[in-house]
Amino acid sequence: MGDDIPCPASLRHYWSYFGSIQGTASTLYFSDYQGQAHKIACSKGGQQGDAFETVRFAVTTFPSFGRVFASHGACTGAAICDDVFIVAPLAEGLALAAELKQVLKHDLVLDLDVPKFNCFFPGDQINDDDHARALFQNVLEANPQLACLSGMDAGISTTGLRVAGVPIGNDEWVQQFV
């Protein structure tokens, strides 16, 4: 950490917009399904569902994701906004997740919600969820640098998982899901 956060030059002319929206307290007014008006005090950030807010958030997190993935050669994956997908051997993938949690907190004051993590063990080497859970816990306990992931109540599976609503796994699991 402490390295420069790169920025595409073409985005520089948007900084005033980002600064005025991201760093300014505001009040969100909305009506519920019964027509009742509500107010919510907002201290920073943008409204979820605002298309430009999604772009702003993605552009803000992208350099941090890129730096962390670049420093973990055994890992591949993808990240956008606050969704991160890591494909790697277990110990390397967890090391990337732990560093990413630390970097996002440092760079962006963003907390990854560790209990929402999921871990999928594809292939035939591990075909029992309890065995996979035990391996997962052993890796966490063996490396003190992974302590920030100890609250990870991962959905651990050897047959499949859902990623952004899409089933990924063995044929039987996907067919059952669909």
Image: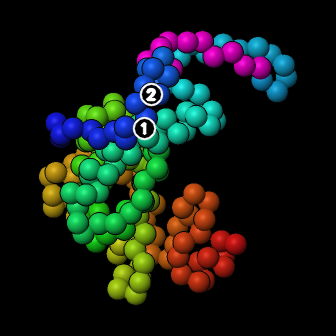
Residues in magenta, as a range: 21-31
Q: Is residue 148 magenta?
A: no
As measured in the structure, the alpha-carbon distance from the residue carrying label 2 to the one carrying label 1 is: 7 Å
Where residue 45 sits: x, y (%)? 49, 25
Q: Mark 2 — residue?
A: 13
Q: Quadrant of residue 139?
A: bottom left
Label 1, secondary structure: give it: helix
> Residue shown at 42%/53% (left/top)?
79
Q: Quadrant of residue 122?
A: bottom left
Q: Amino acid at mark 1?
A: Ser
> Residue shown at 49%/35% (left/top)?
56
The crowding category of the residue bearing disc 2, from other C-alpha atoms within 10 Å (few below 14, some 14 to 19, many at least 20), is: few
The crowding category of the residue bearing disc 1, from other C-alpha atoms within 10 Å (few below 14, some 14 to 19, many at least 20), is: few
Residue contact between numbered discs 2 and 1, judged by CB atoms under 8 Å: yes
Q: Mark 1 — residue?
A: 10
Q: Amino acid at mark 2?
A: His
Vertical placement of residue 32 versus 155, above or below: above
Residue 95, which numbered label? none
